Image (tube, grey):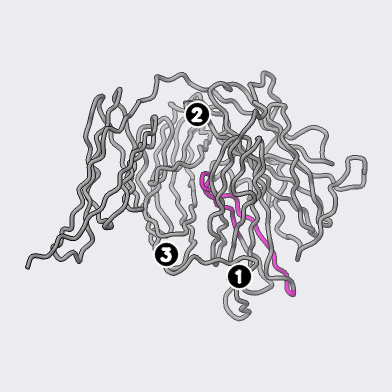
Amino acid sequence: MKRTALLLGALMLGGLLAAPPAAAAPAVKVVVAKVKASSANRSGACPTTVGFSATVSARGKGTVRYRWVRGDGSKGAIRSFAVSGARKFTVRDRQTFETSARGWQAVEILGVRGLSRKAYFRVRCAGPVRVYDVDHLLPADSTEQLVAAAHVDVTPPAYNGTCPATVRFTGTVQVSRVPARVAYRWVDSAQGEGPVEYLDFPAGGPRLKQVSLPLSVGGAARGWKAIHVAQGYDSGRAAYQVTCTGTPPRPGPNPSPSHSPSPSSSPTPSQSPSPGPTRPTPSPSQTDPSAPKPVVAIPYLSPGDYEGSCTAPVVYDAWGTIGLPPGPATTVTYWWILDGSPWKKQQIDIPAGAGPRSQYVLGTFPLNDQQSGTHTLGLMAEGGPSEPVERTFVLKCLTEPHDVTVSIDRISHNVTYPDPTCDEPPRIGLGVTLTLDRAGEVKYRWTVAGRTYVYENALRAGTTSISGGAHSTTASGTVRFEVLNHNMPVKEISYTVSCPPKKS
């Protein structure tokens, strides 16, 4: 019970649990403060993970929706929380880097103009990318402080076919000595950090264990996952892309929603995994009354009830848990159900354990402006209850004026060597001419010789020239200009500069 309460508390702190409808959001005043990166400057071996946090204070009655916005143009998943009175808590995010990078992250409160203060960071990677997997073992050391290392593989990395589909992530976690307990969490390109989980390595047992995280995908998607360990070496990114072909089941509004289960009914992930690999047995049969019955829950559904723009599909993410009482390693068959349409059956291996055990399963699916209404997401497991565990949510797409249309008329650049001896790198000056059919805020990104610069400007209707500044660059390369919102046009050109001949 204590561990369940802690897990639910952590989920609520992260704003992960679905929130009530967002009808009263304007009545809530929100202040975002103490936005920071930890650590803001990192140097050394990579991959490495940078954490981000911010303090959100809200007062009033209603629902607040927020997300992390990143300097590279990407945005995190929308999360929400209810306010009745005053509320103050910390929101967090994590991102994993395999190469040197610099940038920022900020919090965006949806419906409020602008961003919070930015948390700037810089990662300097030294040496080759470090890999610790089944073919590259972490050195054993029984005398020094415990060190852990992680690696993640994804199968398949690219999928092209009918949806829903399943992508499976396999994490390999190693330790420098046993016995040991390792705290780890999954890191996601959109969701940021997942809940903390634990692996136990008993004395005399193996120093390597594997964990599995299946992701059921209900529509086109792309992203990556990694593993962050509390002390040691994080994994690199395992990237995936799902392309859907054919005509998958299309969910529609559900006029008769069922009640969501209480989050308190969710099982607790096991703190005591099996001491080593064990061959799974078939899943429990519904006809065998003595077989252990899977316990199923959906503790996390984001963004929950949603009211706003649906010009781009609203992507929903769900974490489910499948738990068993103490017993041998078991394979459990499960499936998601969206608005009464069952998805393809999947399987999850649950290791043996002397205490209650559970595994996470993930689902993601997009809904568009044709699917406004009440929806129901269910999760079932063979051998479990005859009715699915369900969460209901409301998608309300608001009618908005047409988006701004942006065209890129031309890119201008000027590359020179500022130093006549050419000992210093060349400098490139950037400019672009844009045409807007009406006034609007334009967010755009320059990429010059592999380095990225992101800006945002409020522009009037008509043709406008804007400067991208001057930057150090290489003697040749490509300039790419991308508008990151509206109709998202892209244009790029190549350049070359030669050192001027020295005068005799």
Please state which amino acid type lies under the numbered disc 2.
Gly
Instruction: Tell me the mark number nearer the camera, choosing from 3 and 1.
Output: 1
Is 329 placed above or below 89 here? below
Residue drawn 80% across the image and 44% down it:
294
The residue under label 1 is which amino acid type? His
Q: Residue at x 64, y 44 (%)?
A: 215
Residue ID for mark 3:
125
Q: Amino acid at mark 3?
A: Cys
In this rendering, position of residue 16 left or right of residue 332: left
Q: Residue at x 31, y 38 (%)?
A: 456
Quick one: label 2, few (<14), some, or many (20+) residues within 10 Å?
many
Q: Position of residue 168 (x, y in %)?
A: 66, 49
Is 124 on the left-hand or right-hand side of 82? left
Q: How far is mark 2 from mark 1, CA to CA?
A: 52 Å
* Residue with the mark numbered 1: 136
- Circle number at residue 62: 2
